[in-house]
Image: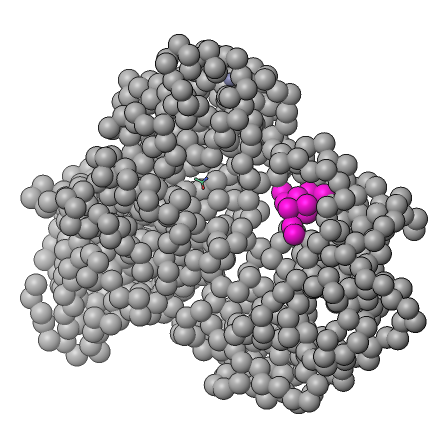
């Protein structure tokens, strides 16, 4: 590259914002002045496609129609196919002050050259309507020679637990492909809903695509084959392959709903209305199961040109097979002694069928169980890295998506009270970024090459809509992109965060993506209502270094509000409203923390007490405490609060449960004056006649989001706990432990001990 001295302010390598960071890049001094007069030139079909993609982005964001014509020496951006460039997705991008040359041996490579070029332009290039009068944009002079570290750079979307419309899928394809993610793993069938139209089996979507939840809400949706084609074509234009997943043989309750003969006992069921693993699975003793799956595959392979086909294989209990004559007969015929061998029989048989259709199977790491896995099968390691390690050692190609290393994007990214309720776990941007998809155990083993790549999974039990999906995906998907694409020696978290916070965030915002911004957190407290008796210091922090601003006058914080620099001294009741600010100026949502100054609430003086609480039980399903009638159906004593949720029989599948509500009341004997923090997933906790914790508006009663600190004097305080038995947001409250937890603020949590509970 010719580096020409220039009077334009110098840019240094620190100011290049490309994500994922390129394999090789030199930054020159100076810029190319890109204007509406810049000529676009292209040679070859793929080069024209890349040029047209670029022209369209410029037209949308500026209103300027760039002219395509013959290449010229000055003021020209040229796209060419150069068969000498090695690597299917590699590209070169040369920006000089006179022009730009993008070259690659394939359309994929040129598409990525365009993506890098777009990231050299200001974030305004992402506008969907002309935002300003475009005159000139300076593009820094760079010379990039780029190629991916891994061929498979994926994201899994799950429209089964909560449906995602076509528009939401396409939006993610557009965003993710801009960061060179090239695989969409589309999880289309599960217990909670079947989402793909299969013409031979219409009931799959008329019966299997809708469920009525425990609270009466209806969740439904499916993709017609025409919509699937539309998505696949949209993905193709974004150089992304769509890999469908058809779950076999577990996670199939929606299909069994429509075609009961698919299960061992031909069960009459509905799509599952709770999360977790379903006992009822498909019956490999019946030929019907195989003919059904083959018919479904026949239709699916026509819709998905990818050479990969995901057959699930995870979390399929074998208890039904052990009790099924047909399954046992099949085992006898085959000389099997363990049900696990039936699992591998299914995977093998369906794998062979798919092989005839030119497809390689991918399966979750359970497909290793039972042995006999065909050498061509690709193992997706999700239960940590072990599945991937074992599979690679056995010669299988593997895809790493370990829940243990942050690649379950349904997990929290920070303190749960600052985020929409998630499935649990903890996966920060840094954790994702730090991952090396070649596990240590494989390094130097000669098997490294079997690691095809890496994927982030967005399971949707706790992703109720596209907005929450985007909150979970971004910016973690950008960390995934760099893990998957960039050479390990080029990775640098600090610089990555700089690029996210200065540039990528503006691009995401331009697309109205609801991306995650770390919010202020209180170290060692997950609480928006704190208490003190005299004065206190409120410390704030963030999961990665960011500026925190706050107000104490009730107004919303602005960029010009007080910057948090040291713990805030509070000496009276105060409402703190606080946000973080990214370097690009975007602010996080506001967090409001109520700090109450109060004397220790005085204890009661009950005349006579005995151990335990009173429990009143009300039969029926109640969605809100006010629906509980005056008169209880029964009354008893309980020694521990946990027993509040154990007053009915709840089988593992939570079917045919006689729901009830219960109220426990009495006294909690506080051992010494102190600030006590309470936490509970029960519907309500009342202390001294005041509503202390109210979860009745929570979408899912998990991860108590309503913790509270109370100043309590030593002695007896009235306590009332309200439990509503039922299924809320897919979560049976019987699965909560029923506890009220407490601690001296900042100390160690414990469930309220039995010795502290009394009734009159
Ligand atoms: C999985 O998370 N069950 C693959
Ligand atoms: Zn069976």
- Residue 257 location in percent, x, y? 60, 23
The answer to whether residue 99 shows anywhere in this view is no
**Residue sitting nearer the eye, 400 or 654:** 654
Q: Residue at x 62, y 34 (%)?
A: 653
The location of residue 316, given as percent across then percent down, is: 47, 31
- Looking at the picture, the colour scheme in use is one colour
* Residue 120 percent location from the top left of the image: 26, 62
Query: Which image quarter is the N terminus in?
Result: bottom left
Side of 106 relative to 385 (left or right): left
Please state the horizontal and vertical placement of residue 595, each as a whole percent of the image. 67, 79
Residue at 41%, 26% in the rendered image: 340
Question: Where 423 sits versus 504, above or below?
Answer: above
Range of residues picked out in magenta = 726-737
**Does residue 662 appear left or right of residue 24 in this picture?**
right
Q: Nearer the viewer, residue 367 or 174?
A: 367
With respect to residue 217, does 194 lie above or below?
above
């Amino acid at each position: 590259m010719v580096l020409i001295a220039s009077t334009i302010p110098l840019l240094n390598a620190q100011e290049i914002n490309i994500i994922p960071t390129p394999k090789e890049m030199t930054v020159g001094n100076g810029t190319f002045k890109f204007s509406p007069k810049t000529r676009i030139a292209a040679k070859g079909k793929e080069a024209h496609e890349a040029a047209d993609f670029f022209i369209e982005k410029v037209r949308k964001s500026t209103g300027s129609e760039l002219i395509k014509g013959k290449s010229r020496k000055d003021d020209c951006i040229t796209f060419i196919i150069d068969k000498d460039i090695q690597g299917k997705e590699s590209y070169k991008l040369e920006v000089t002050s006179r022009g730009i040359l993008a070259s690659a041996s394939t359309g994929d490579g040129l598409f990525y050259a365009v993506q890098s070029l777009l990231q050299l332009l200001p974030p305004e290039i992402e506008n969907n309507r002309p935002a300003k009068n475009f005159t000139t944009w300076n593009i820094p002079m760079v010379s990039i020679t780029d190629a991916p570290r891994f061929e498979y750079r994926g994201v899994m979307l799950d429209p089964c637990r909560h449906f995602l419309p076509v528009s939401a899928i396409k939006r993610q394809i557009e965003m993710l492909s801009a960061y060179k993610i090239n695989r969409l793993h589309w999880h289309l069938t599960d217990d909670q809903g079947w989402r793909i139209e299969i013409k031979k089996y219409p009931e799959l979507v008329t019966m299997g695509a809708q469920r009525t939840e425990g609270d009466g809400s209806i969740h439904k949706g499916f993709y017609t084959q025409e919509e699937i084609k539309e998505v696949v074509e949209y993905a193709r234009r974004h150089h992304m392959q769509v890999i469908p997943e058809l779950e076999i043989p577990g996670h199939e309750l929606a299909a069994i709903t429509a075609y009961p003969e698919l299960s061992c006992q031909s069960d009459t069921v509905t799509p599952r209305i709770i999360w977790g693993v379903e006992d009822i699975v498909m019956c490999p003793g019946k030929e019907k199961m195989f003919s059904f799956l083959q018919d479904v595959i026949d239709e699916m392979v026509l819709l998905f040109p990818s050479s990969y086909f995901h057959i699930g294989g995870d979390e399929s209990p074998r208890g039904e097979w052990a009790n099924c004559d047909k399954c046992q007969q099949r085992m006898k015929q085959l000389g099997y002694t363990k049900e696990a061998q039936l699992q591998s029989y299914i995977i093998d048989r369906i794998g062979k069928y798919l092989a005839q259709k030119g497809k390689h199977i991918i399966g979750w790491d359970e497909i290793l169980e039972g042995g006999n896995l065909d050498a061509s099968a690709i193992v997706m390691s999700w239960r940590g890295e072990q599945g991937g390690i074992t599979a690679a050692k056995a010669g299988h190609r593997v895809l790493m998506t370990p829940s243990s290393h942050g690649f379950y994007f349904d997990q929290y990214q920070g303190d749960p009270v600052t985020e929409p309720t998630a499935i649990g776990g903890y996966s920060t941007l840094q954790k994702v970024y730090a991952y090396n998809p070649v596990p240590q155990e494989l390094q130097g083993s000669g098997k490294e090459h079997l690691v095809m790549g890496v994927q982030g999974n967005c399971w949707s039990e706790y992703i109720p809509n596209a907005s929450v999906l985007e909150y979970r995906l971004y910016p973690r998907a950008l960390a995934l992109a760099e893990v998957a694409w960039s050479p390990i020696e080029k990775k640098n978290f600090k610089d990555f965060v700089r690029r996210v916070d200065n540039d990528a965030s503006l691009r995401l915002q331009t697309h109205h993506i609801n991306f995650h911004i770390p919010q202020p957190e209180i170290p060692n407290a997950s609480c928006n209502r704190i208490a003190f008796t005299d004065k206190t210091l409120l410390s704030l922090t963030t999961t990665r270094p960011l500026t925190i601003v706050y107000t104490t006058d009730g107004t919303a914080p602005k960029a010009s509000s007080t910057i948090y620099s040291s713990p805030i001294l509070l000496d009276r009741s105060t409402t703190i409203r606080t946000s973080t600010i990214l370097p690009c100026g975007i602010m996080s949502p506001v967090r409001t923390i109520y700090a109450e100054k109060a004397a220790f609430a005085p204890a009661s003086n009950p005349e006579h007490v005995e151990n335990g609480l009173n429990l009143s039980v009300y039969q029926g399903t109640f969605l809100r405490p006010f629906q509980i009638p005056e008169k209880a159906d029964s009354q008893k004593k309980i020694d521990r609060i946990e027993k509040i949720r154990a007053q009915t029989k709840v089988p593992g599948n939570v079917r045919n449960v006689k729901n009830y509500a219960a109220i426990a009341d009495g006294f909690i004997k506080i051992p010494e004056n102190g600030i006590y923090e309470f936490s509970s997933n029960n519907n309500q906790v009342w202390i001294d006649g005041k509503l202390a914790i109210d979860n009745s508006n929570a979408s899912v009663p998990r991860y108590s989001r309503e913790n509270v600190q109370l100043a309590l004097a030593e002695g007896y305080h009235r306590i009332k706990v309200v439990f509503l038995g039922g299924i809320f947001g897919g979560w049976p409250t019987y699965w909560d432990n029923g506890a009220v937890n407490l601690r001296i603020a900042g100390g160690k949590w414990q469930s309220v001990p039995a010795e502290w509970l009394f009734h009159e």
